[in-house]
Image (cartoon, grey):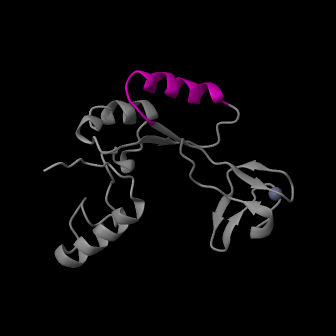
Amino acid sequence: YHYSVYSTPSESLTDRFCRMDKEKFGSVADITDKDYYTNSFHYDVRKNPTPFKKLEFEKDYPVYANGGFIHYCEYPVLQQNPKALEAVWDFAYDRIGYLGTNVPIDHCYACGFEGDFAATERGFKCPQCGNDDPKTCDVVKRTCG
Ligand SMILES: [Zn+2]
């Protein structure tokens, strides 16, 4: 038999599998009670690690996932501090094989704002001018590469 393990990000399954297990096993502390599973070999997001701690923890797992894997870190707006991002990339370069970098890159075509839109009950809103018209808002909450 030939097989490989793929460490998929698979965000929709982290919700679905947890929901299915909760139906079958009930609410289990630190397992199903948080309503999602941590996907792949990723560090538990509830612990809010630094990118360095996260990558150091995850670096030994890809050898078991020869079907594919990704490391990624999510950041706030870093336009004022690109050196911080560069420090993480330098740290990761000799430790891991593939790193995704997620930063907010929302754009408001009404006022020109670029950065992180605010999430509201009605959708996303430009923090600078209040624009929430989807026709003039470009909101991307996840970019890998
Ligand atoms: Zn705006």
Instruction: Where is residue 46? Give x, y as percent.
Output: 37, 50
The residue sitting at 30% across, 49% down in the picture is: 6
> Going by the image, does 110 lie left or right of 93?
right
Instruction: Where is residue 30? Give x, y as percent.
Output: 25, 59
Q: Nearer the viewer, residue 108 or 27?
A: 108
Can see residue 133?
no
Q: Height in image: 80 above or below 77? A: above
Residue 10 occupies quadrant: bottom left
Q: Quadrant of the C terminus?
A: top right
Quarter of the rendered structure image containing ligand 1? bottom right
Instruction: Where is residue 28? Give x, y as percent.
Output: 20, 66
Q: Which residues are magenta?
A: 81-98
Residue 86 occupies quadrant: top right
Within the magenta stretch, is there residue 63?
no
Farthest residue in the left direction? 1
Instruction: Where is residue 51? Give x, y as percent.
Output: 45, 34
Q: Nearer the viewer, residue 52 or 1?
A: 1
Residue 83 occupies quadrant: top right
Q: How many marks?
A: 0
Q: Height in image: 72 above or below 122? A: above
The residue sitting at 45% across, 23% down in the picture is: 93
Farthest residue in the front direction? 1
> Going by the image, does 73 lie left or right of 38?
right
> Going by the image, does 4 lie left or right of 74?
left
Q: Nearer the viewer, residue 4 or 124?
A: 4
The residue sitting at 25% across, 35% down in the picture is: 63
The residue sitting at 57% across, 30% down in the picture is: 85
Q: Main secondary structure of the magenta part?
A: helix
Farthest residue in the bottom direction? 23
Within the magenta stretch, is there residue 95?
yes
> Going by the image, does 126 lie left or right of 37?
right
Can see residue 44?
yes
